[in-house]
Amino acid sequence: MGEDYSNLQRLAQQRSQIPNQPNPKNPQGGIGCILILIALVFFAGMSIIVYFWIYPEFISKSSSDNTEENSTKNRKGGKEKRVSKNSSLSGTLMNAIIVSDENGNNKLWVMTYKYKDSRYIVNTYIYDPYEKIILKNFENEYKNYPAQTKLLYLNNEVWKINIESSGVEAGIFVYDPLSGAEKLTTEAFLSKYPELQCGIGRMYIFDKPPRLDFETKDGKKPVFDIENSKIYNNYSEFRKSFSKDNNTISIFGLGYEKSGEELRKKLFLVTGPKSNLWERNISESYFSNPSTLKFFTKSEAKPLLGDKVFLEGEMLYQDDECCFVFSQNRVGSNAERLLTGVEKDGNILWTASTEDNLFKKLKATDKDASSGMFFLQHSVHILRSGDIVLFTYDRFGFIGFDYKTGKKVFEEELSQ
């Protein structure tokens, strides 16, 4: 684009440098000047048209940049906060979680990033997905690519966990879910626990149950139970906290129908002691042999859906009432993707597919090797809060479904 524009300028300059020939009927320079002026205007206009034809997003970016109002900036540490009336989310999706207000109404926290002017802009929105209104917008700037971040909603607090990455230290921040007010910083968190006084070297986050595994700068490896706000000296001590709980529980399990047919998976209800099932994560291979399951977990499993098989299935979510399985209608590429909700009594709640209610971009295709389930399984997520099921697709967007009916109640596509 720069080369074309320069050529136009040079051509205009060359035209302007051609000497005007005397005209016997008009004073010298009269019509010539007018022609030169017209030529300059013409070439300048053409340059602008060509530029916007190649870069149409410039117009949309300029207009969107002017929609934010009521800005409050704090440049300390390169941080900037804004309250925005802009109704449109922007950027590449990083995280989305459900929070609730005092009346039980659902809102979302949504994190996105975009690259602009040699820096990365990370926006954290408090968002009403039904009215499509941004209630709050907090903006942070980074020189390097944003750290891997996980949002959690526990005990009426939002936890933002930054995993260490190049140029960004690991961090823990806690916020009020509705106002966005910061309640706890990394420094304040570390000061509460003597085991962390030397600082964080590395940090890892796990979902089931939600915990943080640390490697401190003095070589210790404590574990923090986020849900119960309790720290353990190491993973073994954390695990032992469940070892004496012999209460019987039932969880969902997805496993191989037969050994050697790993792409065919069935859904089971597994019943056994909590001391063995507390992670809600059983090896898929155990289900092909009841004796193996009994030996390793002291549990028993019964098929929930008769002969129904989930091809290349992955369990994205489970709680005490239901689970959601992501699968395909056939093995391999060019397949339809399915999201199926199942209750503990074996009833199928509903099924959404890439042919109707899921993003069509999720469909398996031989044109894109990364669309295989092996790559995709870590990019799709489910959260549930009351009557809302939130389906998120990393980098792309999210969909809200009614828990009982499967009706789509909101949807956002943020990037292509």
Image (tube, helix red, strand yellow):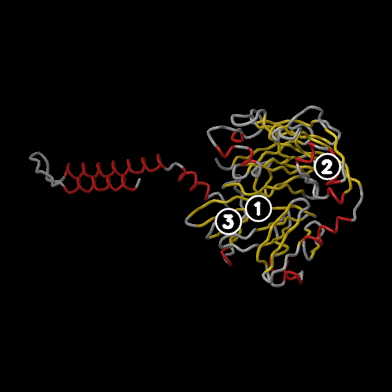
User: For the residue marked with disc 1, what is the amino acid?
Assistant: Lys
Check disc 2 and give the amino acid type: Leu
Q: Nearer the viewer, residue 59 or 37?
A: 59
52 is higher (above) or lower (below) than 236: above
Q: Check disc 3 and give the amino acid type.
A: Pro
- Labels 3 and 1 touching (C-beta < 8 A): no
Mark 3 or 1 closer to N-term?
Answer: 1
Whole-number angstrom distance, CA of label 3 to CA of label 1: 20 Å
Using the image, tell me which numbered label, if any, was put on residue 396. Answer: none
Between the residue at mark 3 and the residue at mark 2, the CA separation in whole angstroms equals 42 Å
Find residue 83 and report its horizontal and vertical position in percent.
62, 55
Q: CB atoms at circles 3 and 2 under 8 Å apart? A: no
Residue that badge 1 annotates: 136
Q: Could you say whether the residue bearing mark 1 is in a helix, strand or loop?
A: strand
Name the N-terminal-most of marks 1 and 2: 1
Residue drawn at (82%, 42%) of the image = 292
Q: Which residue is mark 2?
A: 293
Query: Does residue 259 lie above or below 59 as drawn?
Result: above
Residue assigned mark 3? 146
Q: Secondary structure at mark 2?
A: helix
* 300 sits to left or right of 233: right
Vertical side of 403 occupied by 96: above or below: below
Q: Secondary structure beneath disc 3?
A: loop
Which percent across, then down, holds residue 275? 87, 51
Residue 322 placement, left or right of 56: right
Q: Measure the alpha-carbon separation of dots 1 and 2.
A: 49 Å
The residue nearer to you, when weighing 148 against 160, is: 148
Is the residue marked by circle 3 packed among few (<14), some (14-19), or many (20+) residues within 10 Å?
many
